Amino acid sequence: MTRTFTTAATVEDAIEALGSGARPIAGGTDLVVGARQGKASLPEAIVAIDRIASLGGIVEGEDGLRLGALVTHEEIVANDVVRARFTALADASAIVGSHATRAHGTIGGNVMNASPAMDTGGPLLCFDASARIRSTWGEREVPLDQLWTGPGTTAVDPRELLVGIDVPAPIPATGSSYVRLEYRRQMEIAVVGVTAVVRLDGGSIADARVAITALAPTIRRVPDAEAVLIGSDGAADGIAAAARATAAGSSPIDDVRGSAAYRAAMAEVIAGRAISAALARARGEHVEIPASSSTYAGLGGARA
Ligand SMILES: Cc1cc2nc3c(=O)[nH]c(=O)nc-3n(C[C@H](O)[C@H](O)[C@H](O)COP(=O)(O)OP(=O)(O)OC[C@H]3O[C@@H](n4cnc5c(N)ncnc54)[C@H](O)[C@@H]3O)c2cc1C
């Protein structure tokens, strides 16, 4: 049961509260909803960070994107730069929960909750994103491949605050896609998810990233699948081989949403779809960003 609830007006206030043992709350769609569902009790002390103006906003610079920790999924999907150049991230945020979840749930909360089924993790990992972390002892960048240490755990000290996520600009002719297997469109969590990012040079794939979601204890890349794609011409047999390598690189578990065997079989199917969509986008073809509500209907993704 929570005994202390404070509201921080600045990052410094929030960090001070964290130093006294408080846990940050942004949108509360994991922390509060999880407590109501009995997954974990609310922390003894909570500091609300949702009014810290400096933690909001999406800024595009020459180096790439700077996402404030409080940027919501709605804001991500509505952002033209994300849709055009970081399309897999738009794919992911577009299908988080429901309209209410996306309006309140933040990118910072998604990443720091460290669920192996989080939707934005695969795209951010494949885009080489890093987390900007601040504390009383300074600021540091943690590459996302070093952030998640297990289901629900991170390499971030409880006294540290995530202030933003930096995503380097992709090289032109890069296409990306995130596809998840879901039993229904709204209010669903990934049964299996795959992110693919490919860069074309002439007719062949010069670089490739593949990451799996809900298929291992943390979101992670699959180097064997990437190696199959790099240097290939993106033909169907190469995509199929990379999809098989993606499934082989997964270590799924049995749970209420699916058996490990079902997940492994679906990993191959979903990987094939994600790689095909990323390739199509890299070639400049239109592949729709999922529309979880009418808000996004008709808006599409494009080539970087
Ligand atoms: C009905 C429903 C459907 C959902 N569907 C999906 C889905 O489809 N896909 C998906 O990925 N997720 C889903 N979620 C989970 C959740 O909505 C997202 O993970 C969301 O992005 C969490 O953001 P938040 O701001 O609400 O996090 P919060 O609940 O506020 O925080 C989550 C965790 O992160 C920590 N935290 C938050 N901000 C910071 C920070 N700046 N620095 C350090 N730690 C921080 C908190 O202490 C807490 O441990 C769903 C949740 C619900 C209730």
Image: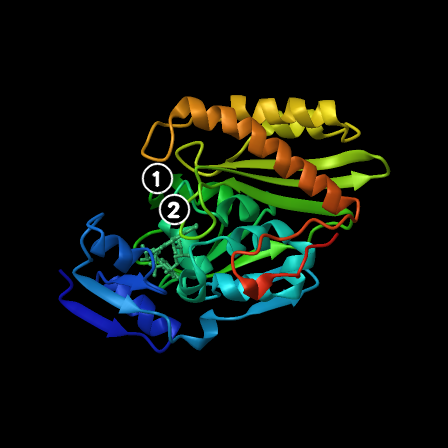
- Indicate the amino acid at tag 2: Ala
- Which image quadrant for residue 53? bottom left
The N terminus sits in image quarter: bottom left
Q: Which residue is drawn at 33% across and 52% down?
A: 157
Tell me if residue 209 can be seen: no
Q: In this view, does 59 lie to the left or right of 154?
A: right
The vertical placement of 303 against 228, above or below, is below
- Which quarter of the frame holds ligand 1? bottom left
For the residue carrying disc 1, how many other residues have a C-alpha within 10 Å: few (<14), some (14-19), or many (20+)?
some
> Considering only vertical position in the picture, is 17 above or below 115?
below
**Residue under the point 75% across and 45% down:** 282
Q: Distance between the residues labelled 1 and 2?
A: 6 Å
Q: Are marks 1 and 2 in contact (CB under 8 Å)?
A: yes
Per the rendering, the mark at residue 151 is 1
Circle number at residue 273: none
Label located before the other in sequence (1 or 2): 2
Callout 2: few (<14), some (14-19), or many (20+) C-alpha neighbours within 10 Å?
Answer: many
User: Looking at numbered disc 1 in the image, what kind of residue is underneath it?
Assistant: Pro
